[in-house]
Image (tube, grey):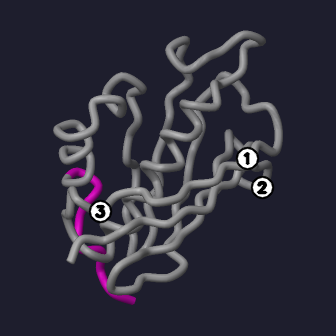
Amino acid sequence: MDEPRITAAELSELLRETIPLTRLLDLRVTEIGWGTCTVLLPGSETTLRAGGTVSGPALFAMADTALYGAVLSRIGLEPLAVTSDLSLRFLRKPPPDDLHGVGTLIRLGRRQAVGEVRLFGADPDQLVAHATGTYSLPL
């Protein structure tokens, strides 16, 4: 297996510099692999909505970030790789605790990348949401 073209620290720095929302949510990159990225959304009142559950927009940002990291793990630090499609399916009420997201690249072409993200709490077998998405890649 090949080594990823970026590190978790490099991706974290890029996110802090170019996507301020990741700072607001305290979204953290915890692991980068070849075609994979794992992120952590710490449990926080910032992400909660009525009913004590994590808001949909916070989960969406988490999924988008994990997929972005999975794409960049293969193509390197490319700030102009952009989301062209992202679909999120809510599967169960997320706990107001730490959530994890694992993005996996399914296909990498010259102009686009396709992947999925699995979002879960403490138990990786109990998904709270599942996302699929496509990134447009610069020439």
Residue 65, given in percent of the width and then of the height, sits at 42, 49
Which residue matches tag 2?
A: 125
Q: Residues within 10 Å of mark 1 (few under 14, many from 20)?
A: few
- Residue 25 shown left or right of residue 57 in the figure: left
Q: Amino acid at mark 1?
A: Asp
Tell us which disc is closer to us: 1 or 3. Answer: 3
Residue 104, given in percent of the width and then of the height, sits at 53, 69
Q: Amino acid at mark 2?
A: Asp
Query: Does the magenta stretch mainly form a helix, a strand or a loop?
Result: loop
For image coordinates 24% across by 71% down, the residue present is: 138
C-alpha distance separating marks 3 and 2: 30 Å
Residue 100, given in percent of the width and then of the height, sits at 57, 44
Q: Residues within 10 Å of mark 2 (few under 14, many from 20)?
A: few
Q: Do labels 1 and 3 touch, CB within 8 Å?
A: no
Tell me the magenta residue range: 1-9
Q: Residues within 10 Å of mark 3 (few under 14, many from 20)?
A: some
Does 8 sit above or below residue 61? below
For image coordinates 72% across by 13% down, the residue present is: 52
Which residue matches tag 3?
A: 81
Q: Do labels 3 and 2 touch, CB within 8 Å?
A: no
Q: Amino acid at mark 3?
A: Ala
Which residue matches tag 1?
A: 123
Residue 71, given in percent of the width and then of the height, sits at 38, 68
- Of the residues under marks 1 and 3, which one precedes in the sequence? 3
Q: Do labels 1 and 2 touch, CB within 8 Å?
A: yes
